[in-house]
Image (spheres, rainbow, N blue to C red):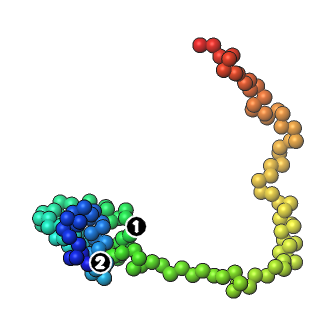
Amino acid sequence: MNIKDIPKEELETMGYDEIAYLVLESNGKKMKLFDLFKKVCKALNLPDETVEERIADFFELLSINKKFVLLPNGYWDLAVNHAQDMVVEDEDDSEVSDEIDEEELEDSEENEDEDIFYDNDLDDNDEEDDDLKDLVIIDDEDIQE
């Protein structure tokens, strides 16, 4: 949709980010922040001072909106134009061996006995170290005040 085709009344109800999206979409190329905001202000018939007064707010707005992406050298563009290609590998295409290598099996059996978190100093009798042995549970009825 071209920004020139949108009535001024409708543009006034839109946010700066929505108008910036339309500008970048109709322009078809990346833009510097200042130039982009200048076009947004021009579409809204705002004075030139608005660009200088609100450019920081505009930057913050674009920064938090995931529809926009900041490119090197200060250019902004639509994120959809820079979506990363995702490669999805089908399970049928990959060759997965269901057989277990004998060496791997032996290694895993040897490592089962080596538990790095096992403390040899602990006794089987944990009653001495029980921090909760003196714990007393009090019902609400037992509490007075």
User: Tag 2 or tag 1, which sits nearer the N-term?
Assistant: 2
Image point 37% across, 62% down: which residue? 64
Badge nearest the viewer, 1 or 2 = 2
Q: Quadrant of the C terminus?
A: top right
Residue 70 showing in the rendered view:
yes
Q: Amino acid at mark 2?
A: Met
Q: CA distance from mark 1 to mark 2?
A: 20 Å
The residue under label 2 is 1
Query: Along the line of sight, which residue is nearer the eye, 112 or 36?
Result: 36
Q: Position of residue 97 (x, y in %)?
A: 79, 82
Left or right, 119 with respect to 62, comes to right
Up-down: is 90 above or below 61? below
Report which quarter residue 1 is drawn in: bottom left
Image point 69% across, 16% down: which residue? 142
Residue 74 showing in the rendered view:
no
Report which quarter residue 43 is drawn in: bottom left
Report which quarter residue 99 is drawn in: bottom right
Crowdedness near tag 1: few (<14), some (14–19) or many (≥20) residues, C-alpha within 10 Å: few
Left or right, 101 with respect to 65, comes to right
The residue under label 1 is 66
Element under label 2? loop
